[in-house]
Image (cartoon, rainbow, N blue to C red):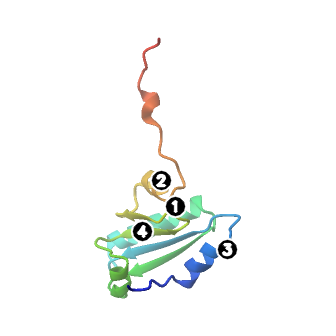
Amino acid sequence: MKKMSIPKNIAAALEEPSTSEKYLLRLYVSGVTERSRRSILNINTICKENLQGQYDLEVVDIHQKPSLAMDEQIVATPTLIKMLPLPLRRIVGDLSDRDGVLFGLDIKKKPDHQGSRAKPKP
């Protein structure tokens, strides 16, 4: 059985209790394309507005580091992986759906749509 190695930054974050959750994000893109640029811009904007410096973002071009993409089983780009805080999450696309990204990162709760229906009174 193959032993999995955990990157040092993830292992340290798992060992140290944190008073404020720091997000560890990895964005996989495919070359210098408009879609890649848009996804980088979108996640940077979302992080700056909602995480106020409580995040580390790594952008990985799968053309430059194909082994990382293989290790993470990336089949589509752009793909954002929230590595910390747990649970791990994957978001695929150009990250233009702001509410979807915030929900996927566990920053914003899913809106309750039940209030839109009128309920019969007893």
Among numbered discs 3 and 1, the one appearing first in the sequence: 3
Give residue 109's mark: none
Query: Is the C-beta separation of discs 2 and 1 under 8 Å?
Result: no
Image depth: mark 4 or mark 1 in front: 4
Which mark lies nearer to you, 2 or 3?
A: 3
Rounded to the nearest whole Å, what is the CA distance between mark 3 and mark 1?
26 Å
- Label total for image: 4
Q: Which residue lies under the disc numbered 1?
A: 46
Which residue matches tag 4? 80
C-alpha gap between disc 2 and disc 1: 12 Å
Sequence-wise, the earlier of marks 2 and 4 is 4
Which residue is at a point 48% across and 85% down the rendered structure image?
5
Q: Residues within 10 Å of mark 1 (few under 14, many from 20)?
A: some
Q: Residue at x 49, y 59 (%)?
A: 105
Q: Which residue is mark 2?
A: 103
Q: Earlier in the sequence, mark 2 or mark 1?
A: 1
- In the image: residue 88, left or right of residue 36: right
